[in-house]
Amino acid sequence: MSLSKVGATSGAGTLAGALPHEPIPTRAFITCGLASLAGLMFGLDIGVIAGALGFIGKAFAASQRTEEWIVSVMMIGAAAGAAGAGTLSHRLGRKKSLLIGAVLFVIGAVACAFAPSVPTLMIGRVILGLAIGIVAFAGPLYISEVAPQHWRGAMVSLYQLMVTIGIFAAFVSDSLLTASGNWRLMLGIIAIPGIAFLVAVLFLPESPRWFLLHNRTEEARTVLYSLRSDPRAVDREITEIGEQLKVRQLGTTLFLHNPNFRRSVFLGVGLQIIQQLTGINVIMYYAPKIFGIAGFGAGAANWATAVVGLTNVLATLLAIGFADRWGRKPMLITCFITMAIGMAAVGTLLSMGVHGETTRYLLVAMVLVFIIGFAAAPGPLIWTLCAEIQPLQGRDFGIGASTFTNWAANWLVGNTFLTLLTVLGQAPTFWLFAIMNAGFILFIVFLVPETKDMSLEAIEQNLMAGKSLRHIGR
Ligand code: BGC
């Protein structure tokens, strides 16, 4: 999920807490809504493998290592897609990048559905990964550029929510298809929303900011007139964007020569490593396996996974509602404690042996505790923070580095979980995640700033003045 990229251009950098009073023009809302389907596609592709994996494993007599690769190879594609997405959306435009992403989604889904062997299945998953990497960059960027200023936070949050809805929808679709055991249909069916997304993108206007970036002022003006209710505001907005575009992105140079910028880059990278080492994607990719270990049959395990997906959606709403009121740090600390408890309890239940219905449901409940903890803070807020802490001149570079790290760490976790279960044992694997989640509290307390109610300019001033990281916020 990628609130991060928003900050690259939005200058808003906060999640929507209270909604602004002035209504959003219908056209702008529809445009953002259609673009947020990018988030839905992202979520569908993350979620779809969970319920299908068991059947795929049987069909190809795949070893545990092979299963780990089938899951995690997608993240290699995503990292590559994310690495190229900046150049793509700069050169071709946001709309064309989204179009390329949409086409890749459809091709990837079809390739997976018809894959005759494990290597071809993996190629299909890499293509899906490329699609994710591109749209997870271009989607939020586009939304932040077409949304009216006061609605920017809310519209980007809508994108966030769509990611979790996509994951949930994929879990439900897998559950409905479990009885048939038809994993090809599970993977292939997401070509349908992929085509819908493709058609939706065709109707989107190009981003006005991109037009301005390429000195195409009249086209930018035409798009803005169609998206704003007050024509006078359009000229003001064009001037403002023009001013912002004068700030040159210094990226690598700044990184090499400015130790203060290096600190914010490392903080972003560290935050994303932490987000993945919470173990969230262990649950997202392998929940049915975990529930299988606890004695659930395939059908029940996939339905329990769907409940996990729904909980993820609902708890994300909590983060959206409260981040700007309670502040990032208290929410993060509370949620890391919650996640540590959830993981520790899952480990303990597994170590005692899950016999009988009650313990089985208790195990699901503890996984839900973990998910609530993740989705109510680190899920969305780490993306927010990664965007907020970077100074304007290095924002593209800083956010690029942290986003790439997110995919790399995501790959690592997805690629090793089953092996960890075998090598360390089931309970110790979850205890390990519990210990890490508890340890991350220290990172939050000592290194992370409170950015609630802070302008991005003030954060930047503090960072560049050499204040310690935790003091660059309030
Ligand atoms: C993470 C993803 C994860 C998703 C689950 C995001 O914030 O970056 O890796 O799959 O949350 O909702």
Image (cartoon, rainbow, N blue to C red):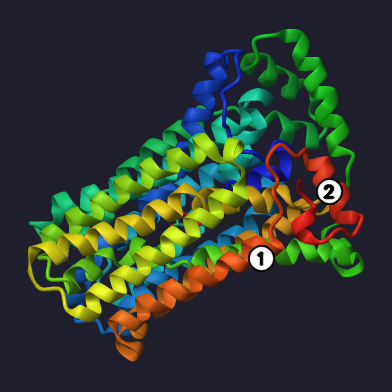
Residue 372 rendering spot, x and y as whole percentages: 38, 51
Residue 324 rendering spot, x and y as whole percentages: 60, 37
Q: Residue at x 62, y 18 (%)?
A: 227
Q: Residue at x 16, y 60 (%)?
A: 361
The image shows residue 70, relative to residue 167, as above or below, that is: below
Q: Which residue is mark 1?
A: 269
The image shows residue 415, relative to residue 316, as above or below, that is: below
Residue 6 visible in the snapshot? yes
Does residue 232 appear to the left or right of 110 in the view shown? right
Q: Is mark 2 within 8 Å of ligand 1?
A: no
Identify the amino acid type marked 2.
Answer: Glu
Does residue 419 appear to the left or right of 241 in the view shown? left
Q: Label 1, secondary structure: give it.
A: helix
Q: Label 2, secondary structure: give it.
A: helix
Residues 70 and 378: in front is 378
Q: Residue furthest bottom?
A: 423
| Picture quadrant of residue 403 | bottom right
| Picture quadrant of residue 231 | top right
Q: Residue at x 76, y 46 (%)?
A: 474
Residues 246 and 413: in front is 413
Task: State how far apart marks 2 and 1 are (Cα).
Answer: 17 Å
Residue 430 rendering spot, x and y as whole percentages: 36, 75
Identify the amino acid type marked 1.
Answer: Val
Q: Which residue is mark 2?
A: 460
Residue 277 visible in the snapshot? no
Task: Between label 2 and label 1, give the one nearer the viewer.
Answer: 2
Residue 117 rendering spot, x and y as whole percentages: 27, 75
Crowd tier of the residue under label 1, counting other residues whose Cα lies within 10 Å: few below 14, some 14–19, many 20 or above: many
Q: Are marks 2 and 1 in contact (CB under 8 Å)?
A: no
Crowd tier of the residue under label 2, counting other residues whose Cα lies within 10 Å: few below 14, some 14–19, many 20 or above: many
Q: Is tag 2's residue or tag 1's residue first in the polypeptide sequence?
A: 1
